[in-house]
Image (cartoon, rainbow, N blue to C red):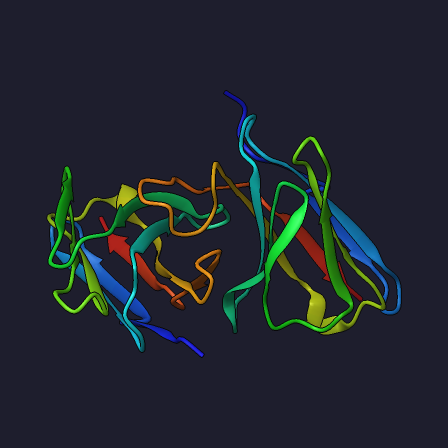
Amino acid sequence: GQQVMQIPQYQHVQEGEDFTTYCNSSTTLSNIQWYKQRPGGHPVFLIQLVKSGEVKKQKRLTFQFGEAKKNSSLHITATQTTDVGTYFCAGPQGSNYKLTFGKGTLLTVNP
Amino acid sequence: KAGVTQTPRYLIKTRGQQVTLSCSPISGHRSVSWYQQTPGQGLQFLFEYFSETQRNKGNFPGRFSGRQFSNSRSEMNVSTLELGDSALYLCASSLLGGEASGNTIYFGEGSWLTVV
């Protein structure tokens, strides 16, 4: 079945440094979604990318969808302590009603 | 508007017992999905319901079941609990579910299940 791999598993940065997490799917995706889960919290939807090569920005966050629609990345510029959490990517599998999540990247920020 | 509501938030059960978890989606949302989250396996899809019909099912044993009512509220049930069922069970609601472009998915805060 479809697999969604996410790297790195963990990332620790100093406040102000940049951060990037990468997501790769074993199959072409119709879209990819990104979520953030704060420690002890629940996943919160960040964004959905649909088009090949699409780039979207949300303040300091930049999301990219690869040309082949099999990979994606999330880049955070100048991290802040509020960015702490686990970032997940997810892609629809099969009938499209089923989301397959990556294992997530846990970001910690040292103030 | 009110978010996705899951009850109970925390519960402890004994091996062999069964448990029912409830999810009330955002008003107007017709799709409800359930996920199991554990430190080792991450977020794993259980099933998805839309207008009372199960549209997809993940790779979980038959002990895991669910249903959706006419008001879109959903329940999931786990019978004959095992220690490995200890997890955070998350419910997610959306207007249409799945891949619909621009379709935002909202998770509830989850139900923490501990099996002892």
Front in this rendered view, residue A21 or A28: A28
Front in this rendered view, residue A14 or A62: A62
Q: Position of residue B101 (x, y in %)?
A: 31, 44
Dividing the picture into quadrants, the one containing residue A96 is bottom left
Q: Residue furthest top?
A: B1
* Residue occupying the point 71% across, 47% down: B10
* Residue occupying the point 63% across, 40% down: B51
Q: Position of residue B39 (x, y in %)?
A: 52, 68
Image height of A15 relative to A6, above or below: above
Question: How many numbered marks does the figure carry?
Answer: 0
Dividing the picture into quadrants, the one containing residue B37 is bottom right
Residue A104 seen: yes
Q: Residue furthest right?
A: B17
Image height of B3 relative to A97, above or below: above
* Residue occupying the point 48% across, 56% down: A97
| Residue A71 located left or right of residue A4 | left
Front in this rendered view, residue A39 or B27: B27
Q: Position of residue B95 (x, y in %)?
A: 48, 36
Front in this rendered view, residue B103 or B34: B103
* Residue occupying the point 11% across, 49% down: A77
Q: Split into 4 quadrants, where in the image is the C terminus of chain B?
A: bottom right
Residue B47 seen: no
Q: Position of residue B19 (x, y in %)?
A: 81, 55
